[in-house]
Amino acid sequence: MVSKKHISITVNGEVKETEVEPRMLLAHFLREVAGLTGTHIGCDTTNCGACTVIMDGKAVKSCTILAVQANGKKILTIEGLSKGREKLHPVQQSFVDKHGLQCGYCTSGMILTSYWLLKNRKNVTEEEIRAAISGNLCRCTGYDNIVESIKDASKKMEEEGDPIEEHPEIKVRA
Amino acid sequence: MELSEKLVRGEGRFVDDIQMPGMLYLGFARSQYARAKILKITGAQLTHREVNFEVVEVGEGATEGGPAALSHPVLAGEYVGYVGQPIAAVYSDDRYVAEDLIDSVEVEYEPLKAIVDPEESLKREGMYPGIKSNAIVDRYFGKDFNPDPSDIVVERRLINRRVATNPIEPRGIVAAYDGHKLTVWVSTQSAHSIKEGLSEALKMEPDRIRVVQVDTGGAFGLKGGLFPEYVVACYLAMKEKRPVKWIETRREHLLASRPGRGVVANLRLYAKKDGTITGLKGDVIVDNGAFTGGSGEFSPMFIARQLAGAYKLPNAYVRAVSALTNKAPQGPYRGAGRPEAMYFIERLMDGLADKLKMDPVELRLINAAKETYTSPLGMQVEKSREFLESAIKELNYEKYKGRENVGFAFLILYHATAGGESARIKVEEGRLKVWTGGNAHGQRHDIFIKTLLKEELGVPEDLVDAMKGDTDQLADGVGAWGSRSSMVLSSAVIVAARKIKEQVEKKHGKYTLKALLEGNWDEYEFFKYDKTESSLGANLVTADIDSYGRVMVKECLSYYDAGRVLDPDNARGQNAGGAVQGIGQTLSEELSFDEDGLPLITSISDAGVLSADLVPKFGIKFYKSESPLPSKAKGLGEAPTIGVPIALSRAIELATGKLILETPIRPEYILPEERA
C-alpha cells in the first residue's frame, strides 16, 4: 500500500487535518472523514453533479478530485450554506418554496451549482440557468421547478444578500 | 424538520450515509461474458458454493411460480447469462480495499455464443441445458378473425429498445444481524416486498426480518424488487455478525440492474376506408434477459392486453412472448408495459391516418370508445371520446393541425390500484406519525398526506410526520409504483384517519382536535381494492430538427385526467419529470449491445439522460373528474412516459419525412441526406 499523505482542508470554515491514502476521493473525504454526508455520489464519472461542492471559488465535482488535490484549499459543502443558522440560505429556501426537489438526491449539487451561478451573474436568464445546471442531472423534476427555484433565489439574493458573506471563515471566493 | 428542509440542508439520510462500527463493504466480481460456462473461480471470499440461494420475484409485476430453473442465482453457478452477472463476492472493512479485492478474483470461462436478439432467440438452441425453448412466456390474447379483404392494412415492426432506469442514487443496502433478527436499511419503493423476498430467498421466518426504508433517491420502478446483491449482503451480515454495506456503482447499474422497455412488436392494424378500425393482429416479443426475477414474465401479457389503446377495437388476436437473451433481466421502468403498448397502437394509428390521408387526430376521434367496453384483448377500455374532444380543445389542436412538426398522443393509463395499500396513523405526545405501505422515492407523498389529514382531522401540517417505510411499524404493505399512490395509498390514509375520528367520537361524544392530540390513538388500515382503474391522457409535442439532425423539442404539453389533483405543484413536477424521461427514451436513452452481448453503455454520460439545457419548459392542464376512491384522485406519474414518446416520434416523422419505428431514434437515421 502506498504511504498515507498528510492533508489539511478547510471545510465550511473548519480545518480538517488528517492522513489519507493518496487515492482517496474528495467526495469520500467529505462524507466519511469529515462526516458531511450531504455531498452525494451518483455516477462516479463527473457527469451527474450530485457531488458538486465549491472549491476555492469554483463549482467542482468532488467524485473525481482526489482529497490530496484539495490539500490547502477551502471547500464549501451544502451543510456550510446554512451552518450554525436556523434560517435556510436564500437558495435553499427557494428550492423549498418552489418545489425544486423531489427525491432530494441531486439537490445538494444542484443548489451549490446554483449558488455559484448566482454569485457570478445578476439577473440570470432562463437560458443561462439551464446552461449553468447542465452538468447536474435530475431524474425526478424535469428541471422546470428547479429553474423556477433558481429564478426565485436570484431575487431573494438581491433582496436579502448572501448570509455567507458575514462568515469570513466559511466564505469562499465564488 | 420538514422533509424538504432536511434535504436542502444536506441532512437527508440515504443508504450510503449510514455508518456503523465494524461495518464491512461488499463488492462483486461480475461476468465479463454474456454467455459462458464457469470452469474455475479463484481469489473469491464467497461463491455459489456457500451462497446458493435464488432471487424470487417480488414487487411490481411479480408473478407466481415462474420456471424455477430460470430463477436468478444470487451468485452464478455453472453458467453466466449476462455481462455484469454477480459471480463472486468480496468484502473488507475499507471500501477501497473491497474494490481491490474484486480485481483479485479470477474466473476461468468457457465462452458460449451469446443470444442477443429476442426474435433470434426463439430460433436458437435452449440457453441452458434442459431448456427446450427460450420462450419463457408464449400466450395468445383475443380470438383469431378473418379480416375483410376490402379493409386497409397498416403493417409495422416497432421497437422500444432497452433503457436504464438511472435513478441518480444507485441501488444500495445496509444489513445488520443481532443473532436473531436481521435488520436492513434500503433504498426502496417497497419495504414489504424486500422483506418478503429476503424471507423466501434466505428461508427465514418473516418476523425475524425488519426492513427499513431510508431516504430513497429516485427509483422509477427499479427499486421495487429484490436483487442478488441484497441477499448476499444479508447472508454476510449473518455469517460475520457484522453490519454489511453494498452500494452500487453507476457502471454496475448500467450492466446489472433491471433495465426497462426492450420490446419488439410486429403488428397489423385493419380498418375500413372511412377510418374505422376493425382489427389488430400480430405479436409482441419482450427481451427478457437471462433469468426470471425481473418483469419479463409479466410484461408481454400486460402489453398485449392494452393494445386496443383508448379505442373501440372489435377484433384482436395477439401473441405475447418473452424470450431469453444474454442480458440482465428486464424490469419495470416508469410505465412498465404501458408506454410500449400505447406506442405500438398510436404509431399504427398515425400510419393509418397517413394511408387514408386523414388528419391523425380526426382518425383518433372516429375510433375513440363511445362507451366503456372490454376489449377483445381483455382490458376494460373506458369511454374516451368525450375526453378526446376536450383534449383537442384544451391543447388548442386546431392551431397546430396540418403543421409539419407536430405530434399528438392519445393514451389510457392503467393504474396498479389492484391489491390496495396500507396506512397506519399513530397519535402520541400531540403529534401524528403516519406509515404507509407504498414508499415514496421522489413523489413527495408527505405533502399530500399532510393535506389529507388536515382535511380529515383538522390537524395542522406541522404536527404530522410522514414516516419512511418500516416493516416493524406497519403489518403489511404493497409498494409505490404503477401510478397508484395518489389513489390507494391516499385512500388508506383517509380511511385510517376516519377510523381514528370515530374512536375519538366514541370516547368523547364528539370529535375535537384537542381530544385527538391529547390522547393516544393508533389505527391501521389495509385499504382493499381489487379493481384496476384507468384514466385518459393526451400529449401534444412540436419539434424542430437542425441541419445536423439534432432534435429540439419546442413545446411539450400534457392534458391528463388526474381526478382530484391532490397537490398541483407535485403534479406539475411529476409531469415534467416523466416528460423528460419520455423525450430521453425517444431521442437518446438506450442500453445497446454488440453482437456478442457486450454492453456498449457503461457510464451515465453515454446513457442519454437529458440535462436542463436540452429540454423545454413543460405545460400541463387537467381534465376535471373524480375517481371512485375515497381520495377522488387518479394517478398520473406514468402518463408522460407513455404519451411523450408517441407525440415526439410523430413530430419527428413529419419533420424528417422518415417513418419512425424505433426508440430511441438514432441520429444517423434522421440525419438530413446531404450530411449522411
Image (cartoon, rainbow, N blue to C red):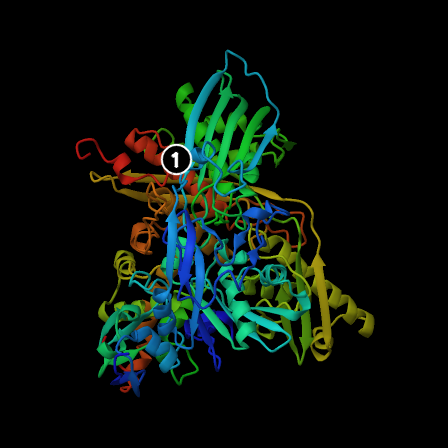
- Label 1: which secondary element: strand
Residue, x 68% and y 68% (percent of image)? B207
The C terminus of chain B lies in quadrant? top left
Q: The disc labelled 1 sits on which kind of residue? A: Gly
Q: Nearer the viewer, residue B114 or B309?
A: B114
Residue, x 29% and y 44% (percent of image)? B552
Q: Where on the picture, by quarter, is residue B536?
A: top right
Name, please, the residue furthest toward the top.
B150
State the count of labels: 1
Name, please, the residue furthest toward the left.
B674
Q: Chain of mark 1?
A: B
Q: Is residue B383 left or right of residue A1?
A: right
Residue B590, position as x, y percentages in the image: 36, 46
Q: Is residue B448 left or right of residue B266?
A: right
Residue B369, position as x, y percentages in the image: 58, 30
Q: Nearer the viewer, residue B393 or B2?
A: B2
Say if B422 sits above or below B601 in the image.
Answer: below
Say if B89 sits above or below B368 in the image.
Answer: below
Residue, x 54% and y 68% (percent of image)? B234
Residue B627, position as x, y percentages in the image: 64, 47
Residue B497, position as x, y percentages in the image: 70, 65
Q: Is residue B622 left or right of residue A10?
A: right
Which residue is the site of mark 1? B407
Q: Residues within 10 Å of mark 1 (few under 14, many from 20)?
A: many
Q: Is residue B359 visible?
A: no
Name, please, the residue furthest toward the front.
B39
